[in-house]
Image (cartoon, rainbow, N blue to C red):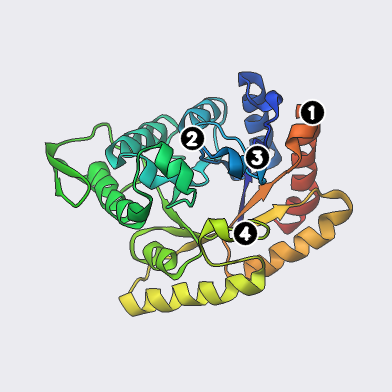
C-alpha cells in the first residue's frame, strides 16, 4: 500500500505559512524525506462563501503548486486530489498534465471527478447539469491528445480537426488516471477508462456532495466488490488502484489505532491511502511538518 499526503491548505481561513515558496517547498521536501509516496493538492478555484463558512477550505491552483513541488523533489508522485475536470477545457488540462509529467520525469497522476459545488460551476460559466457528460467526453479528448499523432474529434462539447499536442507525457501511454466519486457511475467510469478509483470519505460533508456516503471500511467494501464485478463483466484484466482517505491521524498515542485501520483498508483492497492533517490554520509550519513526520515514523514505517 502506498501513502500520499494532502498539502495542509485544507482550512478556511488558510494558514499564510503555506502560501509561500518557502512553506510549500519545505513541506514537499519533508513529505518525500519522511517516506510518503505522493503529495496531493485540492482544487477549488472559486468556491462559494457559504461553502467556506460551512467547513470548506481554500486552495492553491494545483498545477502551479505541483510545479513548485516537482522542482524540489525527485521521487514523490504529484497528484491533484481531485481536479474538477468539467471546469476546464480538456486540451488545456492535457497540455498541463503532459508538461508536468515530462518535466518531473513521469511522476504525475491525474485524479479527476465531477465536483459538486453548483455555485462554483456557475461562477466559471460551466453547466452544472452537464457535468457528467463533460467529464466523460473530456477523458476521451485527453487520451487522444496524449497518444494521437493528429487528433480529430467531434463530440457534443468539444471539437477538433487535425490538431497535435507535443511534447507528449513521459508516462506510456499516458499518466495514470484516477476517477473520483462514490457513485455507481463513478465506479463504472473508473473500471472502463481509468487506472484507479478514488472514492472519498464523506463523513461530515452532508448532502451537498451529491454522491453516495462512504464513511468507513464497511461502506467501502461493497463498492470495491462492485468494481471487481464490473471489471469481470467487461473483461478488464489490468489491475485497478483503489485510493481512499485515512482521514486525520496524528500519530503518537493514536498510532496503533491508525495502523489497525490501514491494515483493514489493505485487506479490503485499497492500494493508495491519503492522509491529511487538519487545524493547519492554527498551527505553525514547523508544527504541521512535525506532525507529518511523526505520522510517517509511528504509523507508516511499522507497516512497511
The quarter of the displayed image where residue 171 is located = top left
The mark lying in front, picked from 1 and 3, is: 3
Q: Residue 184 got which mark?
A: none
The mark lying in front, picked from 4 and 2, is: 4
In the rendered structure, are the residues bearing label 4 and label 2 in contact, judged by CB atoms less than 8 Å apart?
no
Q: Name the residue under label 4.
A: 206
The picture places residue 267, in percent across and down from the top left corner, at 64, 71
Task: Name which of mark 3 and mark 2 comes first in the sequence.
Answer: 3
The quarter of the displayed image where residue 195 is located = bottom left
Answer left or right for 25 relative to 95: right
Q: Name the residue under label 3.
A: 10
- Rounded to the nearest whole Å, what is the CA distance between mark 3 and mark 2? 14 Å
The mark lying in front, picked from 1 and 2, is: 2
- Rounded to the nearest whole Å, what is the CA distance between mark 4 and mark 3? 17 Å
Q: Name the residue under label 1.
A: 284
Which secondary structure lies at badge 4? loop
The picture places residue 194, in percent across and down from the top left corner, at 38, 58
Amino acid at each position: 500500500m502506498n501513502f500520499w499526503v494532502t498539502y495542509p491548505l485544507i482550512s478556511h481561513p488558510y494558514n499564510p505559512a503555506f502560501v509561500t515558496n518557502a512553506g510549500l517547498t519545505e513541506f514537499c521536501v519533508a513529505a518525500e524525506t519522511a517516506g510518503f509516496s505522493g503529495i496531493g493538492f485540492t482544487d477549488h478555484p472559486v468556491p462559494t462563501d457559504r461553502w467556506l463558512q460551512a467547513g470548506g477550505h481554500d486552495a492553491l491552483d494545483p498545477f502551479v503548486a505541483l510545479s513548485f513541488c516537482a522542482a524540489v523533489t525527485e521521487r514523490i508522485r504529484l497528484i491533484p486530489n481531485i481536479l474538477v475536470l468539467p471546469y476546464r477545457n480538456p486540451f488545456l488540462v492535457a497540455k498541463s498534465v503532459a508538461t508536468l509529467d515530462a518535466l518531473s520525469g513521469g511522476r504525475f497522476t491525474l485524479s479527476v471527478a465531477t465536483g459538486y459545488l453548483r455555485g462554483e460551476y456557475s461562477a466559471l460559466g460551466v453547466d452544472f447539469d452537464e457535468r457528467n457528460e463533460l467529464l466523460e467526453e473530456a477523458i476521451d479528448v485527453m487520451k487522444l491528445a496524449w497518444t494521437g499523432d493528429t487528433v480529430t474529434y467531434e463530440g457534443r462539447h468539444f471539437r477538433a480537426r487535425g490538431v497535435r499536442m507535443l511534447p507528449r507525457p513521459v508516462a506510456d501511454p499516458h499518466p495514470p488516471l484516477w476517477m473520483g466519486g462514490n457513485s455507481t457511475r463513478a465506479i463504472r467510469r473508473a473500471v472502463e477508462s481509468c487506472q484507479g478509483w478514488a472514492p472519498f470519505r464523506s463523513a461530515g460533508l452532508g448532502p451537498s456532495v451529491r454522491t453516495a456516503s462512504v464513511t468507513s471500511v464497511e461502506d467501502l467494501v461493497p463498492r470495491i466488490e462492485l468494481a471487481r464485478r464490473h471489471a469481470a463483466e467487461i473483461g478488464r484484466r489490468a489491475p485497478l488502484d483503489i485510493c481512499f482517505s485515512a482521514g486525520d491521524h496524528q500519530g503518537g498515542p493514536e498510532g496503533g489505532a491508525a495502523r489497525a485501520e490501514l491494515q483493514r483498508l489493505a485487506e479490503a483492497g485499497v492500494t493508495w491511502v491519503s492522509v491529511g492533517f487538519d487545524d493547519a490554520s492554527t498551527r505553525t509550519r514547523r508544527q504541521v511538518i512535525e506532525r507529518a513526520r511523526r505520522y510517517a515514523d509511528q504509523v507508516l514505517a511499522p507497516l512497511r
